[in-house]
Image (cartoon, rainbow, N blue to C red):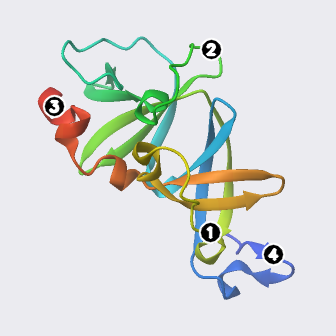
Amino acid sequence: MSELAPIKENGKSLSENKKGELLQYLTFKLIDETYGINVMQIKEVLRYSEIAPVPGAPSYVLGIVNLRGNVVTVVDTRVRFSLPECTISDDTRIIIIEHDGEQVGLLVDAVQEVFYLYQGEIEQSPSVGNDEALMFIQGVYQKDEELVILLELDRMFEHNEALGIAAMS
């Protein structure tokens, strides 16, 4: 079995960098903003499919989908961040993550790319915006000409009851 070649940057192995641990993020769009999720939290990315509504669920819980025999709760990420609801398009995706052994889907406008950054390159997020969205932000990263808002999904799902997942599981 062959070994993967180490990733190089400016002729040096990435592990030699003094900026901390090398991380990999998936970026996605909500309206005109770019967000990032650590790929270690992502199980898979799905095309949009019909979501069965669940009566009595919080407004940001769209409902459930059947994923290979498993029931997955789908959250409208825009509504969770107090943004206007989205219209479904060909680019709409559901990002499946795992939190505390449960799979949860995040509805996003579009998935963009995967990129690498070092832990030390993450900047503290500014204290602007609403408190609901701010508590989910790990930090920001300036990627080329674009600001990427890095999310801390564990904070988003700390209280499953608040999300409505416990009642539906």
Q: Which mark is residue 123?
A: 1
Disc on res. 11: none
Indicate the secondary structure of the residue bearing disc 3. loop
Give the residue at mark 4.
9
Quadrant location of the C terminus in the rendered image:
top left
- Residue holding disc 3: 169
Q: Which of label 1 and label 2 is nearer to you?
A: 1
Say above or below: 27 vs 82: below
Whether residues under marks 3 and 1 lie with C-beta atoms below 8 angstroms apart, the answer is no
Q: Residue at x 60, y 27 (%)?
A: 109
Question: Could you tell me residue 33's position as x and y percent?
Answer: 66, 39
The residue beneath circle 2 is 89
Q: Amino acid at mark 4?
A: Glu
Q: Which class describes the residues within 10 Å of circle 2: few (<14), some (14-19), or many (20+)?
A: few
* Position of residue 95 in the picture relative to residue 2 (left or right): left
Label located before the other in sequence (4 or 1)? 4
User: Nearer the N terminus, badge 4 or badge 2?
Assistant: 4
Task: State how far apart marks 4 and 1 are (Cα).
Answer: 21 Å
- Do the numbered discs 4 and 2 sit on residues whose CB atoms are within 8 Å? no
User: Which tag is nearer the camera, tag 4 or tag 3?
Assistant: 3
Q: CA distance from mark 4 to mark 2?
A: 37 Å
- Type of the residue with mark 2: Ser
Q: Quadrant of residue 154?
A: bottom left
Could you tell me residue 52's position as x and y percent?
A: 31, 11
Q: Secondary structure at mark 4?
A: strand
SS for tag 1?
loop
Q: Quadrant of residue 8?
A: bottom right
